Amino acid sequence: MELDRKVCDRARRSRDARFDGKFFIAVTSTRIYCRPICSARSPKDENVRYYATAAAAEAAGFRPCLRCRPEASPGTPAWSGTSSVVSRALRLIGEGALDGDGVEKLADRLGVTDRHLRRLFVQHLGATPIEVALTRRVHFAKKLLDETQLPIAQIAFAAGFASIRRFNAAFRAVYRRPPTAVRRARRPGSARRRGPGHLR
């Protein structure tokens, strides 16, 4: 998905909330990506890259900001402009289509080849179906870590991971630290607002 650099620059500099979730800001000097509303000090223009989705930013090697929490941004309106095949695939991924099966079975359900589906995802979202699914799982787990008191094992399975080991590895790959460290660093009272076992 094409992003207008000038529009993104203006939205970033003014921290325009209307663009929250519509694109993500990646900073090459820190290797972190943020939401347009992030309160962190503005980076130099030459260090800024823009991505339409969090998955694309992560596929490019950037990790989520722990201050503005990209996993809590509005429901990625940027994805609504995708092709009908990708839109249907995203809905199925959201329903867990890749939690147990591979991209081949997802492509079969959509009536396309797995190669064509990967090409469409990269074209429209800047990331493969597996990268999109993994980003969604890890982000959901991060929200649960921040907003509930659920045990980490329960969070791993609720987010669609088949094992604690895979969850820990995926989480560490994205956030560069284990889930336990992120939970310890969360804002005081964030879990109490939601209750001990609240999943939404």
Image (cartoon, grey):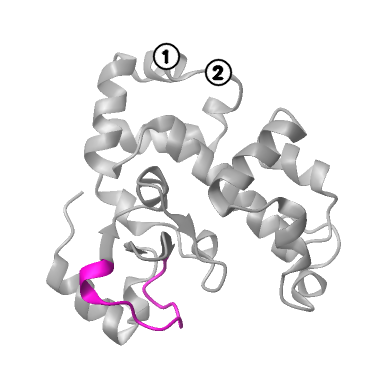
State the SS at label 1.
Answer: helix
For the C terminus, the quadrant is bottom right
| Left or right placement of residue 74 versus residue 138 in this view | left
Q: Residues within 10 Å of mark 2 (few under 14, many from 20)?
A: few
Q: Nearer the viewer, residue 166 or 31?
A: 31
In magenta segment, residue 102: no
Q: Quadrant of residue 46?
A: bottom left
Q: Are marks 1 and 2 in contact (CB under 8 Å)?
A: yes
Can residue 114 be seen from the camera position used here? yes
Residue drawn 58% across the image and 54% down it: 175
Residue at which label 2 appears? 101
| Labels in figure, total | 2
Question: Can you give x and y, in whole percent of width and height, for residue 143 in the image?
Answer: 65, 59
Q: Main secondary structure of the magenta part?
A: loop
Given the image, on which type of amino acid does mark 1 rest? Glu
Q: Quadrant of residue 182?
A: bottom right
In magenta segment, residue 46: yes
Given the image, on which type of amino acid does mark 2 rest? Asp
State the SS at label 2.
Answer: loop
Q: Quadrant of residue 19?
A: bottom left
Residue drawn 49% across the image and 34% down it: 93
| Magenta residues (range) | 34-47
Q: Nearer the viewer, residue 152 or 78?
A: 152
Tell me how far mark 1 sits from mark 2, CA to CA. 8 Å
Q: Which mark is residue 118?
A: none
Q: Nearer the viewer, residue 13 or 93?
A: 13
Q: Residues within 10 Å of mark 1 (few under 14, many from 20)?
A: some
Question: Can you give x and y, in whole percent of width and height, for residue 61 in the image?
Answer: 40, 48
Question: Can you give x and y, in whole percent of width and height, for residue 122 in the image?
Answer: 27, 35
Q: Which mark is residue 104?
A: 1
